[in-house]
Every structure is written in structure tokens, then in C-alpha cells.
Amino acid sequence: MSETKRLTKADVLRAHIDSAIILTAYEDAYVSAHTLVMACEELIRTLSDKKGRPYSSDWRSRVNPKYRPKAHTYINDKYNFFKHAGHVKTTLDEEARRRQDRPA
């Protein structure tokens, strides 16, 4: 009977970073590399928030709080497009056009 290995968040983070580096080094599967890097950023940010210790490259510390919601949407646009099948948009350009047409 095989033993089940317990993964920690640090293990998952390490695996994602390793995979993203390999994909980037081979200049292959940029969509997958982007998704892995964004998952790492989200995991680091969430763990830092839970521990109450900000990390040095947290984008939120560099953006005026007034603009953070817009920045968050901008930063996560491709990430969400790549990882969610339920999005109505069929291309990233389509989503950008829809946002421009929305009333402020």
C-alpha cells in the first residue's frame, strides 16, 4: 500500500514556480506559464495576508488605494480568462471592448 504524501502550500508554491520557470526557459506554453505565475502571486499574497506580513513585491503597496480595484481587474484579466471556462468572452480583446463600453 502506497503512502499518501501531504502537500503544504509551500510545496505547491515551489512546484508552480519550478514549472513556470521551465515553461519560460523553453519559451513554450506561455499561457500555462502565465497562469502558474499568477497562481503563485495569489498564493503568496493570500499567505502573507493571513500572517499579517506584507511581502516586498506586493503590487498593492505600489498602487494608490483609490485605484486598487481597477488595478486588480487589469492585473487579473488574462489570468481569469486563461483559467475560467465559464467566461462569456471568447477573446481578450472582446472583454477590453466591453469594459470601454460600460458606464463608469
Image: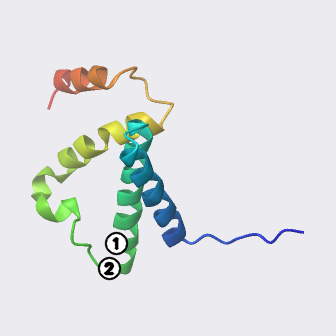
Which of the 4 image quarters holds residue 66? bottom left
Task: Name the one closer to the observer, 91 or 17.
Answer: 17
Residue 50 figure quarter: bottom left
Disc 2: CA contacts within 10 A as few (<14), some (14-19) or many (>=20):
few
Q: Is 67 drawn above or below residue 17 in the view shown?
A: above
Residue placed at 37% from the left, 66% from the top?
44
Q: Which residue matches tag 1?
A: 49
Label 1: element kind: helix
| Residue 12 position (above or below residue 23) | below
The amino acid marked with disc number 1 is Asp
The residue that appears at 43% across and 23% down in the rendered structure is 88
Q: Do the residues labelled 1 and 2 touch (CB within 8 Å)?
A: yes
Residues 8 and 14: in front is: 14
Position of residue 56 in the picture relative to residue 49 (left or right): left
Mark 1 vs mark 2, CA separation in Å = 5 Å
Rendered image: mark on residue 52 = 2
